[in-house]
Amino acid sequence: MNGGGTDERLEPSARALEAAWQEAGNDDRMEVIVVGAGQAGLAMGFYLARQGRQFRILEAAGTVGAAWRDRWDSLALFTPRRYDALPGLDFPGDPDGYPTRDEVVSYLATYAETHRLPVVFDSAVQSLTPIHDGFRLECRGRTVVADQVVVATGPFQLPFTPAVAGELSPEVVQMHSTSYRQPRDIPAGGTVLVVGGGNTGFQIAGELTSTHAVHLSVGSRQTPLPQKIGRHDLFWWLTKTGLLKTTVDSRLGRRLSAQETLIGSSPRGLRRLGVDVHARAISASHNTVSFADGTQLHVDAVVWATGYQPDYSWIDAPVLDSGGRIRHHRGVTDVAGLYFLGLYWQHTRGSALLGWVKDDAEYLATQIQTLAERRKARPDTATREHLVSGEINEEPHHVDSQ
């Protein structure tokens, strides 16, 4: 991930791992490089370590799980702790409770320490290029060569703010949800518009009602689901019914991947808290926002909970479609040895969720092992092999995800 501060507790480990990189010998050639030390990269590291691979995890920030630190203070996951573990380490606490942002940050740090994963911090990858026997990565003054590469930068890359934001007066306080931390970030006494109908927009709008007059702009109809059904959490039912194993290749999966699902929130629930819900924001002038239904609203502040867009400009390989989305089949691209992990609906709804990313990580570890063994047996054909089988899928456009 990009950005993020430095976790002082991890600095000694970062220095130790950097020293290990330097002392390993042939330190600029690896079997596998993993780009990103979020949940996806750490899960990938677990399976690579279990295979005994020579690998490193390159992280742009100074700590693991940097994307989680860019979320608001009161964030709580909508998946219970019993479903939030990465492979090889249970998530601590009440299994039926919902972990906070800080609990997730702490868990990921503990996970990297527990499994002694070789994370190299402050190592932003500036370019990734296929070469005749693998890949070349340029990384802050160092060139690293790897036989295979897993891009695990996840779905939260570049915060997206629509063009209408530029039409508002400088007097209107504006921020993307990645910059919002708590209600006091918004000047008191004014009208706040939250733009974005995903889980993030609904949760921030609900939190702000205790201190501000809040409005929410929703661009499309969402599907609200209750957090609990009867005595059980929603994810208990999704697991028992097998819906979480529905793949994006199936008819149902294609339909589900095209729509945003609200969990534990709804327009009706926000209205009970005093939030006025509006249609899509389509234009603005000075301090007035106009909506698709013809109504207008004078605002003092706007929080743009409008999701993210991918940034793969640093990848010099033919893996993108005309819209800049990854073409892949369950994370395997048609460039042999280049994989992606943690994408929204990469294979199932759980692909970008903390507790389910391990399934795709384990699958990719098997692909990595297969290619390594094939190249070892037939080294002269290494640059011509491709492991993709079946149809290559385009990465779904990510709007908002936990």
Image (cartoon, grey):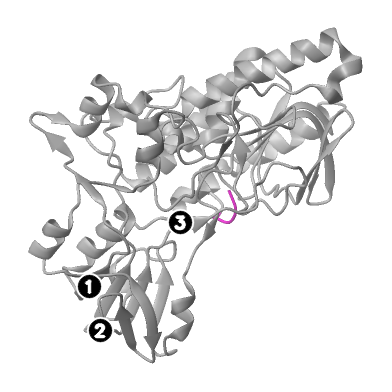
Q: Earlier in the sequence, mark 2 or mark 3?
A: 3
Q: Are marks 2 and 3 in contact (CB under 8 Å)?
A: no
The residue singled out by tag 1 in the image is 215
**Helix, strand or loop status at disc 3:** helix
Point out residue 124 in the picture as x, y percentages from the top left corner. Answer: 70, 50
Density class for disc 1 (Cα within 10 Å; few <14, some 14-19, many ≥20) is many
Task: Between label 1 and label 2, give the one nearer the viewer.
Answer: 2
Which comes before the other along the chain, label 1 or label 3?
A: 3
Instruction: Please report contact status of discs 1 and 2: CB closer than 8 Å, yes or no.
Output: yes
Q: Which residue is mark 3?
A: 70
Q: Quadrant of residue 386?
A: top right
Q: Position of residue 300 (x, y in %)?
A: 30, 84
Which amino acid, by three-letter code, is at mark 2? Leu
Q: Say which of 309 and 32 sits in front.
A: 309
Q: 122 or 364, which lies in front?
A: 364
User: Of tags 2 and 3, which is closer to the observer?
Assistant: 2
Q: Is residue 93 left or right of residue 168?
A: left
To which quarter of the image does residue 84 belong?
top left
What segment carries the magenta color? Answer: 1-5
Q: In what element is the residue under mark 2? A: strand
Task: Please tell me in which quadrant of the rendered image residue 341 appears.
Answer: top right
Task: Calculate the distance from the C-alpha at mark 2 to the C-alpha at mark 3.
Answer: 29 Å
Residue 43, placed above or below residue 155: above
Mark sitting on residue 297: 2
Give the percent coordinates (x, y) of residue 282. 37, 76
